[in-house]
């Protein structure tokens, strides 16, 4: 909104909305008025914006009853507590799991087993870990993308 030069409808179409809302300074309002005198399409657009403002200006949101707010905040607290609980559980499980895996790796490497058996144990463990990770990832992805998660019976 520089207020200089003629009105450029391609770059300054947003000024029409500001004109309808009475938010323009005097210079921009004068530019828009001069443009509206010569452009029938712009006048139609301004009339459409005025009708839209009139319709939407009377819309009001219905206030939620107090019971709904109580239930809402209870749900927020429950979700926050459970999220924190799961986060702490996962961190603890990851630390213990990493320690157990390290101990198993050290034990297998230190054991007097043939090299092929040691390799087979690592391949077996890697395959199991990959399958568990894949199943968990698929469940997580499906849970996020399902269209029916908000459906209540």
Image: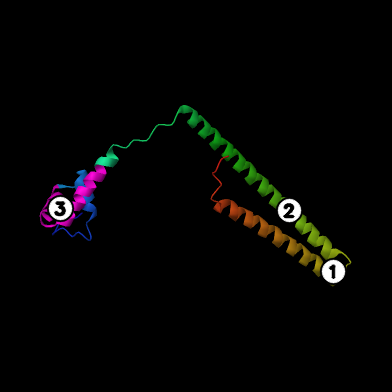
Does residue 90 lie above or below 74 as drawn?
below
Query: Badge 3 local density, few (<14 within 10 Å), some, or many (20+)?
Result: many
Circle 2 residue: 97
Residue 88 pos. (x, y %): 65, 45
Query: Badge 1 local density, few (<14 within 10 Å), some, or many (20+)?
Result: few
Q: Is residue 20 left or right of residue 74?
A: left
Q: Is residue 96 left or right of residue 29?
A: right
In magenta stretch: residue 42: yes
Find the distance from the CA under tag 2 to the CA under tag 3. 69 Å
Q: Earlier in the sequence, mark 2 or mark 1?
A: 2
Q: Secondary structure at mark 1?
A: helix
Query: Badge 2 local density, few (<14 within 10 Å), some, or many (20+)?
Result: few
Task: Kindly indicate the quadrant of the structure image that contains residue 133.
Answer: bottom right
Q: Earlier in the sequence, mark 3 or mark 1?
A: 3
* Closer to the camera in the image, 15 or 117: 15
Magenta extent:
26-53
Task: Kindly indicate the quadrant of the structure image that contains residue 121.
Answer: bottom right
Residue 94 pos. (x, y %): 69, 52
Circle 3 residue: 32
Does residue 2 lie above or below 22 as drawn?
below
Circle 1 residue: 117
């Amino acid at each position: 909104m520089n207020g200089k030069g003629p009105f450029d409808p391609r770059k300054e179409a947003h000024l029409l909305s500001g004109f309808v809302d009475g938010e323009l300074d005097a210079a921009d309002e004068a530019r828009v008025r001069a443009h509206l005198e010569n452009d029938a399409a712009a006048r139609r657009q301004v009339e459409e914006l005025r009708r839209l403002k009139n319709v939407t200006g009377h819309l009001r949101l219905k206030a939620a009853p107090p019971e709904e707010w109580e239930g809402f905040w209870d749900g927020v607290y429950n979700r926050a507590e459970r999220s924190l609980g799961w986060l702490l559980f996962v961190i603890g499980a990851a630390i213990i799991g990493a320690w157990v895996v390290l101990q198993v790796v050290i034990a297998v490497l230190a054991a007097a087993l043939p090299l092929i058996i040691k390799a087979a144990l690592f391949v077996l463990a890697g395959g199991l870990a990959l399958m568990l990770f894949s199943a968990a990832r698929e469940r997580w992805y499906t849970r996020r993308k399902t269209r029916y998660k908000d459906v209540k019976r």
